[in-house]
Image (cartoon, rainbow, N blue to C red):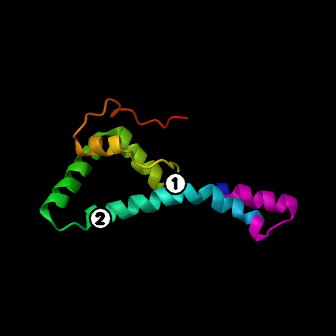
Amino acid sequence: MVLSEVIAECFRRGDFSRGALSAYESTRRRPVEVLQGLADELVFFWNAGDPFRTWLRDRVFHILNTNMRLRYKMLAQVAGLEDQPYSLLDRFMAVGLVPDPRAHQWQRRT
């Protein structure tokens, strides 16, 4: 969607220069960085061979299965719609160390 808006603006101005197209990168940079960080984190746990990380990974997956808010946040990050990574509190909730009073809420706040 962002790219289509940038290209439409390029057509309107007749300018397809690097500078004109840089609006796309500047708009998408933050969500992409968040997604890359999430991917690095997931690989760290997904490829775990030690018992603690394996247990932790399985526990988080179980909690994400029951926590609609955290599951939606994961989906929104992967889809590039969310540019805020999981907070430290979100992580504690995902592990089950802190209850999530909004676990049943999945709507994106606007």
Total tally of numbered discs in the picture: 2
The image quarter in which residue 15 lies: bottom right
Residue at the far top in the pictured view: 101
Considering depth in this image, is 2 or 20 the residue closer to the camera? 20
Residue 106 to residue 82: above or below: above
Relative image position of residue 58 (x, y in whole percent): 20, 54
In this rendering, position of residue 8 left or right of residue 25: right
Q: Tag 2: residue type?
A: Phe
Relative image position of residue 4 (x, y in whole percent): 70, 58
Neighbourhood count class around disc 1 (C-alpha, 10 Å): few under 14, some 14–19, many 20 upward: some
Does residue 10 belong to the magenta stretch?
Answer: yes
Kind of element beneath mark 2: helix
Considering depth in this image, is 77 or 26 the residue closer to the camera? 26
Kind of element beneath mark 1: loop
Instruction: Tell me the CA gap for discs 2 and 1.
Output: 21 Å
Q: Which residue is mark 1?
A: 80
| Identity of the residue drawn at 52% across and 54% down | 80
Of the image marks 2 and 1, the number of the one nearer the N terminus: 2
Q: Which residue is mark 2?
A: 44
| Identity of the residue drawn at 49% across and 38% down | 108
User: Magenta residues?
Assistant: 3-19
- Between disc 2 and disc 1, the foreground one is 2
Q: Tag 1: residue type?
A: Gly
